[in-house]
Amino acid sequence: MAFEVKEKDLLGRIGLLHTKSGVIETPHMLPVVNPRRQPVSPKAIYEDFGCKAIITNAYLVRKYFGESEVHQFLGFPGVVATDSGAYQTLHYGEAVDASSADIVRFQEAIGTDIGVILDIPTSSEASREEAEETVRETISRADEFFDLRRREDILWVGPIQGGVHLDILERSAKEMARRDFALYAIGSPTTVMEAYDFPRLVDMIMTVKRVVPVGKPIHLFGAGHPMVFPLAVALGCDLFDSASYALFARAGRYLTEFGTLRFEDMSYFPCSCASCARTSPEEVRSLPPARRESFLASHNLRSCLQEIARIKEAITEGRLWELLEARSRAHPQLRSGMEVLGRYGDFLEKHSPSIKGRGMFYFDHISLLRPEVLRHRKRLTERYGPPRGKSVLLLLPQPEQKPYHGSELVRRAMAGIPAKAHICLYGHPFGVTPVEIDDVYPLSQFEACAPDAETCEFIVEAVAEYVEKQPYRKVFLVDLAGSGLEWSRLRNVCRGRKRLELMRCKRLGADEIGDLLKRLRKFAKST
Amino acid sequence: MAFEVKEKDLLGRIGLLHTKSGVIETPHMLPVVNPRRQPVSPKAIYEDFGCKAIITNAYLVRKYFGESEVHQFLGFPGVVATDSGAYQTLHYGEAVDASSADIVRFQEAIGTDIGVILDIPTSSEASREEAEETVRETISRADEFFDLRRREDILWVGPIQGGVHLDILERSAKEMARRDFALYAIGSPTTVMEAYDFPRLVDMIMTVKRVVPVGKPIHLFGAGHPMVFPLAVALGCDLFDSASYALFARAGRYLTEFGTLRFEDMSYFPCSCASCARTSPEEVRSLPPARRESFLASHNLRSCLQEIARIKEAITEGRLWELLEARSRAHPQLRSGMEVLGRYGDFLEKHSPSIKGRGMFYFDHISLLRPEVLRHRKRLTERYGPPRGKSVLLLLPQPEQKPYHGSELVRRAMAGIPAKAHICLYGHPFGVTPVEIDDVYPLSQFEACAPDAETCEFIVEAVAEYVEKQPYRKVFLVDLAGSGLEWSRLRNVCRGRKRLELMRCKRLGADEIGDLLKRLRKFAKST
């Protein structure tokens, strides 16, 4: 096994990737090293930045430096991956004057640890026909590759093309998944990321992720901004490679997890990394251009590595969703990207770990897309039935105190309620909570602020769904004044007023509970 | 002038506070130095952390060390503030066996740079009567102080008490503001912050802020978690003091801008500060307890200072609101705190700088609380009138392209519209934008994701308000299918259908604009 998973949260994972030059822990960003111009030396990347794996361009190495052992040549004692050079053709319009076979043989000759076949990237402007052509050609080269490969100790990456044409991307993923690569890569998302088109990026990653075997690591080509890592990891990407840290530095840009700053305009470093801690933007601006660039590249690289560390810590703590919500405020398109997760709720729910032991935070209706919320709702619908003999349902707004059955009012209600009546609490983020399971994780383990309008709709929908599914003869529901809940959907489910008794209260105190219990007992007696 | 403001954003500011030992830049957190037990030495705080001001407890210094020049005694070459020790009585129930006069004289004797009179803190459980008593006594000591003070070179802080009783707090602020202190402090918010009761904290800060002269610096006592700084600064707090970095370290807690982590449970440091960059939680756990505590205290302090730097950079860039939105995802109560800002919209709007030159981000209805949004709405209502001779209003949904008048459809509409008709665009986050001012800052300088339900209501409300105010004879409004906008509020304003013509379109293309213009021309001719 080249890849083993140590920890999981959402579709994200901490994994170990075993290569012939050692083990690297994922998620991992491979900084792109350009042997011709490098603002941070490979040795420094290894020693000072603690980054144990890099990537370089096989095609460029071959063109300018010829064959030589790549670790020695770069002076990098860690893991070296090589990209085929295919990206050159896409990005710089440079014709790659090497055959697919040349590139495979060359990567074997220089002793790369992780190699990529010479694929044909799909540009973001590609028509359907062009996209199909890139997929077809990439697959035929993949087949050719399996005949060409000689070394068994290199991990090979199967690139998946198709770009923004999701059906073509899916077909490509299916075809590549059938071929036994050690890793799979999502090709050419760079322009999508540059346009901050995160909703589309979510669709692309999920299209691939649903097809490729869960146990295989996924590489997202060209992702090198800390802004994009949390979302990409949460969707199951394990490796990234990018020259962004250096390219942005050259353009005078300072990367942060919340976006890109123009270095010229900065007054303070919002960062305490080794590069930034003991200087100021003003001081750095007075340096000669090459040192300024190298300063920015160092900070940018640290910014990427720090975000990866944050993600790992979030995964081990079961707080990756919280990190996503925080980062969704880096740009409106990231928030839109979160909204798209709703499309993949079932898949997310299926593959996210069940017990993290940590409470969840509710902020707004986006928090309702969490796997925990969907999981509870599915369980209620598919597997839950009320305790035996309970034919009457009493739905109370959930109290502040958790678990609910410990609160004064719920205890009072439980004490005086007729035997055939069943108490459930309703509210956000879990919709309906039957009182007898209210201390089951995660139903009491959350912190919430007031619900937004969409969440109010969600609550009513969850109540209606529950009532529709369960065989209660009669439903009593207490609605508090000012709740903002509009119950018509529930009324429809109960077909008019017969089955439903909706009681509005200004407040819910001991008196109100007393009245309520009287009515319930009266009803219980009469039937 | 002891305090001058260099930069502003929202009510937050970067300022210079002139003391006899030098100038410090605000916002600034003064780490509390405990001369009896200190995990990070004052010298290190100054030299290694670059932190130029600290605070220590005058009462404790006096009790255990007697009179001696405080900078020399602590070995701190920067600015030293002293707290009176009043907090001891509140927090540790320790009786302060010194008179108010003793404490003032003592602070003068040891040569503090910033001193605090011996106030009576209001505990969070104080009844109204008790709260009133703390205020009364604090004011009488303030009066006594002005007779006692001898030195003119010390900046004195006037503590404002009243706690969570906002009316009493306001009265206290008014009384203290009448007395000429160099700084004012909001007393005893610690328990409110410990309970994450940020909505209440907002109310407390704003109550004081609206009363105290704008030009005076405000000190928030006991705030020492990076989570709380952005909100507190945005509301106009300039100074903080706290022992949290050390106290949390002693309790094995690791501070981050997103909350507090249990150090025992950590696997990765989500931080690249000088303390964390070259080690791992596992390594640090193997250190002897005192070194572990000192490690955590160092990181915690760096985490606070880094957040202050981020805030400063955000202020200079005009992105403080964006930082607030990002940080509002650290805890649901922080988001609730943001919602409370709505209560203070007018004050925020009045004191926030107008032109920042930066675009704004819209994420959800909380973004509508931004001063820019309220400012535009106020201007439309109070100062704007449509161009002369325009008696018919055409309201179009705002196109993607900004400024709107550059978009194909708006250009087409403008070209064919009758002279008496006026085009306005509607949408979020600005509600209504008259086409002739659509390139005025900030109406075209924003990035937005899809509106939430509250924002849809806001749009309709803004349109209704505009139509109600302006003297158009006839209003044509184009509503796109699936807009989610419910126009009944507008219908009410237009008193039925006579004044309003609501046209629903599946899409808005050249044909639809053509039809629309025909109808407008017909109407214009007929009247």
Image: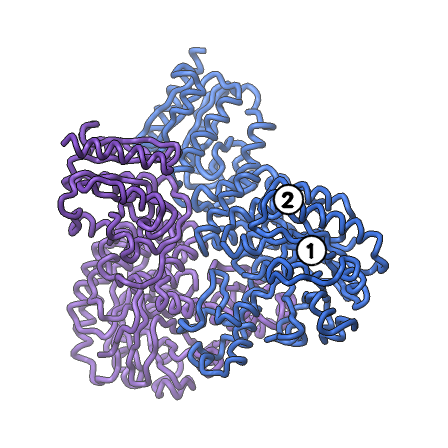
Chain colours: A blue, B purple
| SS state under label 1 | strand
The amino acid type of the residue labelled 1 equals Gly
**Disc 1 packing (10 Å; few <14; some 14–19; many ≥20):** many
Taking the image as shown, residue B227 lies to the left or right of residue A296, namely left
**Residue receiving disc 1:** A15
Residue A98 seen anywhere in this rendered image of the structure: yes
Q: Is residue A5 left or right of residue B345?
A: right
Horizontal side of A518 relative to A185 (left or right) equals left
Residue A353 at least partly seen: no
Do marks 2 and 1 share a chain?
Answer: yes
Disc 2 from disc 1: Cα separation: 25 Å
Q: Residue furthest top?
A: A526
Closer to the chain start, of discs 2 and 1, is 1
Whether residue A322 is situated above or below residue A483 in the rendered picture: below
Q: Residue at x 70, y 45 (%)?
A: A212
Q: Is residue A434 above or below residue A161?
A: above
Residue visible at 50% across and 83% down? A288
Of A73 and A298, which appears nearest the observer? A73
